[in-house]
Image (cartoon, rainbow, N blue to C red):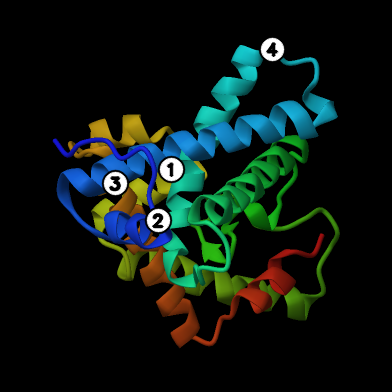
Amino acid sequence: MAERVLDRTNEEWLAALRGEGDAQALALNDLKERLQRGIFYYLSRERSDLSDLSSNELQQMAADMSQDATLRVLENLDSFRGDSMFTTWATRIAVRVAISDLRRARYKDFSLDDIMADGDFLPASANPLMGERPLSPERATERDEVLGKIRAALGDVLTDRQFRALYAYAVQGISLDVIANDLNTNRNALYKLIHDARRKLRTYFESQGLSMDYLINLFGET
C-alpha cells in the first residue's frame, strides 16, 4: 500500500486522483476525509437551523454528504483551473453538495434535484415528475415525450450494472458501501462506475438536443 501523503500540491492531487491502484485509493480516502471536515465545519458553524443536532449527528451527516461530494469532485476535475488550492476548490464543491442535500431534505415535493446533480442527469423514479398545478396539454405532451427519451436512455445507454449502481445511489439513497457489496466491487471502482454512467447520460442527452437548461425549465415548473 502506498505511504500516506500528508500534503500534496495541486498537480499531485490531480495526478493521484486520475491515477490507478494504491496511490489513487489513498488520495480518494484523503480527499473524502478533508471534504468531511469541511462539510462538518459548514454544518456546525454556518447552519443555525441545525443547532439542535448533536456533534455526533452532524458528524454522521458530514460523513454521508462527503461520499457524494467526493464523486462530484472527481467528475469535475477537468474544470479545476488552479486559481486556488485544490483542497479549497474541492471544499467549495462539498459545501454546495451539503446545501443541495439539506434543501432536498427540507422540501419533500418534487424538485429537479431529484434527477439532477450540478448539471448531471440522474435516473427518474417511477412517479410522474410533475407538480400539482395542471399543465397545458402542449406542455404535458412535451414532458411525456422527454420522459420517454429519458426512460429509453436508461435502458439503452447504460449497462445493467451502471443502471443498478446509479439508480440505487441517486434515487434510492443507498450508501456506497452497501451498493459496492451488492455489486461485489469496492468503493473506488464504484466511484468510476457511477461517474461513467452520468457521463454517458450527459453525452446522450446532448446528442438529443436536451440541454440541462431545457430540462430545468421543463421539469422545474410546478
| Dot 4 amino acid type | Ser
Which is more N-terminal, label 1 or label 3? 1
Q: Work out whether residue 173 can be spotted.
A: no
Q: Residues within 10 Å of mark 3 (few under 14, many from 20)?
A: many
Q: Work out whether residue 143 can be spotted.
A: yes
Mark 1, residue position: 169
Q: Is 117 located above or below residue 150 in the figure?
A: above
Closer mark to the observer between disc 3 and disc 1? 3
Mark 2, residue position: 9
Q: CA distance from mark 1 to mark 2?
A: 31 Å
| Dot 2 amino acid type | Thr
User: At which x and y percent is residue 204?
Assistant: 41, 78
Mark 2 residue element: loop
Mark 4, residue position: 54
Q: Residues within 10 Å of mark 2 (few under 14, many from 20)?
A: few
Which is more N-terminal, label 2 or label 1? 2
Closer mark to the observer between disc 3 and disc 4? 4
At horizontal 77% and vertical 76% (from top left) the residue drawn is: 137
Mark 3 vs 1: CB contact within 8 A = no
Q: Which mark is residue 62?
A: none
